[in-house]
Image: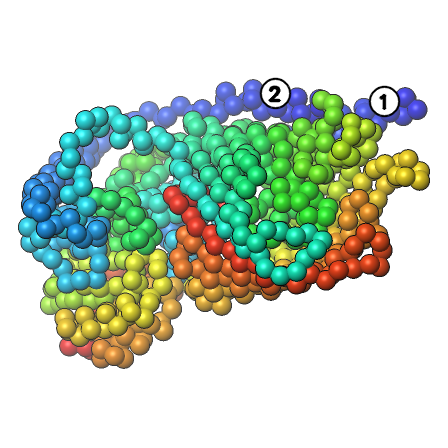
Amino acid sequence: MPERKLTTRLNAVTGALALLAALVLLPPSRAAGKLQIMTATTDLAALAQEVGGDKVEVESVARGYQDPHFVDAKPSFLLKLKRADLLIVVGLELEIGWLPPLINQSTNPKIQVGAPGYFDASRFAKILEIPTGQVTRAEGDVHPLGNPHYWLDPENGLRIAKGIADKLSQMRPADSAYFEQRYADFEGRLKQADQKWLEAMKPYAGRKIVTYHRSWPNFAEHFNLNVVGYVEPRPGIPPSPQHTVELISQMKRDNVKVIVVEPYFDLKTPNSVARETGGQVLVLPPSVGGEKEITDYFKLFDYDISRLKQAFDATH
Amino acid sequence: MKKFVLVSAMSCLGFTAYAQQAPPAEPVTPLAQETRMKALEDQVRTLAEEVAVLRGELNAVRDAKSPQSASDARVLLASSHLDPGTLVTGAPVSPASEPSQLPQTQAAASTQPQTYGGATSNAKLLNPDISLIGDFIGTAGHNIVSPSRSLELHESEVGLQAIIDPYARADAFISFGETGVNVEEGYVTFTSLPAGLLMKVGKLRADFGKVNTIHNHALPYIDRPLATNNLVGGEDGIDDAGISISRFLPAPKDWFFEGTAQVFRGDSSTLYAANRREDLSVVGHVRGYRDLSESTNLDLGISYSRGHSNLGTDLGSNFFTNLYAADATLRWKPLRRAIYKNFLLRTELFWSARDQLSAVNIFETQHAFGMYTSAEYRVNRRWTLGGRFDRSGRATSANLTDTGFSGILTYWPSEFSQIRGQYRFGHLALGAPGDFSNANEFLFQFLFVMGAHGAHPF
């Protein structure tokens, strides 16, 4: 009887050691050559691709047509995060509901918060709507650090791209000239495109619009639009009848005709507001990938601006 | 098993020393200098803009000292734009443009002298994220087998979460209930271990199946399934002090596999009791996950746990409880309408083999089976419909089987509060086999969240 017990014990210990050995010795996956970049959103992926060129492989966790506040922390992302050399996040607590567990569970020391492979793009961008005074959730799902939809200003796009280029040069000093050159090229093309966009939007300067969520302050500032109201009574709070009535009367008073809606919101309330006010609902993707043809950062503005022009022309 | 713990813990701790990475040196080239100059220029510009804004705010604060201003409690959303006149204001009102109109804000409140200055406010930055979740439950109806109180603040869960250092973070959830305080979980997670290991040390909810890992407030129903109550230690479940190690496992293409091994002291509510130091309990869990499409995924798991039966006496060391579980979850959530529509179907099966004292044979093993199946469907942004079917034997007397079902309706005023109603029917076993009592109950729950409660695992 004692012998049997001893054997069982030995078996248990050997088993445990074998399991431990298996756990420790399994080779961690390595990607050779290209820097593996994961981003929280598609816009950051597009910017990273612009400066990284063929020296990087970039993938975004969220899709462009997905509400970036609500993304599922699916385990399938963990495998990708585990391989990443660099993680680029929007920051300002946009991803607070889903990214932290992904980072923790990724078991990738390189991309932990504060590690060299953790890159918070908001540190490079101009941030609007930073609340002052007392912040409470009576204001809805406020972002105490400022509005996180900052990538919709081409100037911020440039700043972020610069930050990424510097980061990449730091990580791959041998390729720094390549990244600098890619950035310079991107800067040239973006400035040129921005001239074109500003030109296109010039006739509509100061035009008043209503948006569903507070996603567009940077866009509105850069292109001189005036966001006078929101379909949401407060950020993250679904439309209420009372607020909708107020919004309709405000739009009538201010003669606002265009209601911009992000592709992940329900169109029922915006449509009824449009009917009441004789306005037009415009589904405008705030991110790269929001529509099939929006495949890069330039096409995002191309698309949004041409749609806005059409809407302004149609409702004038 | 003890040796395994010791060896694994030692090796993991040993390796943490290697986890730090030296930052790569910065290359100094003329190009880099030029870009640095540019960066400095940008910085100066940004600073100038900030000064402009601060000036605007200062004026605002000065103006705010006029007496009529304190009435409006609206938060002003300031921009860092050069000209404060073009601020995008918070509420949907026509944009107030004159700086002199800014004062109607809470900024007025901050005009009192701050004796302690920046030091205290900066120190706050290092405070952990603090949250409190209140869970208020009311019950009406008839239940003579497991009655609960009519109204109770079932628990107030305080969460403290922070990054400890470059290698670890910590999470503590302290639950204040009607009967006392309980550290529901409190553990440190080492995130930078070598070989892809993730280690948690502290008191934690064991990785046994799905429902055992979920905090009360995050459940899709008000109560816990009958199988949890009958077989897996009730509301607290397997929740004990111990060490957990997990790692991704090699998996077929498109699959994600994760293995977890946990060792606990061996005390878990009515389930396990450790009378001696060596009476440890163990939990093993393997999870398989696959995306079936962008919006649909399948989550499977098998779990095993073993500990010393809690007999209420110190005879427990020779009496074991073995628990086996299998879980399956199917989720559907279309990405474009994720906040309006989604569906989740979940089933968990539990088998319990419990050694215990028997009046007839002195020693006996009771083999009991339990299961639940639940479904949730999000109808729109604010409403969710749910249902659950329960069936479970009792761990201590497997010939007694409870059956039940529930219908659940949940309403979300916002992300931070929740109102839920649940109708629960139970066909509950009384002392003798074949002797049942029917329970018809209506439960309701109010949940509210203060502060920044961290995300829950998927």
Q: Residues within 10 Å of mark 1 (few under 14, many from 20)?
A: few
Q: Which mark is residue B22?
A: none
Disc 1 marks which amino acid? Leu
Horizontal side, residue B123 vs residue B178: left or right: left
Residue wearing tag 2: B10
Q: Chain of mark 2?
A: B
**Residue positioned 30% across, 63% down in the render:** A232
Seen in the picture, residue A1 relative to A262 is either above or below; the reply is above
Residue B31 in which image quadrant: top left
- Give x and y (percent) for residue A254: 14, 71
B257 sits left or right of B410 in the view = right
User: Where residue B81 sits: x, y (%)?
Assistant: 14, 48
Residue at the spot of label 1:
A6
- A243 lies above or below B255: below
Give the letter of the chain under mark 1: A
* Secondary-structure class at tag 2: helix
State the SS at label 1.
Answer: helix
Q: The disc labelled 2 sits on which kind of residue? A: Met
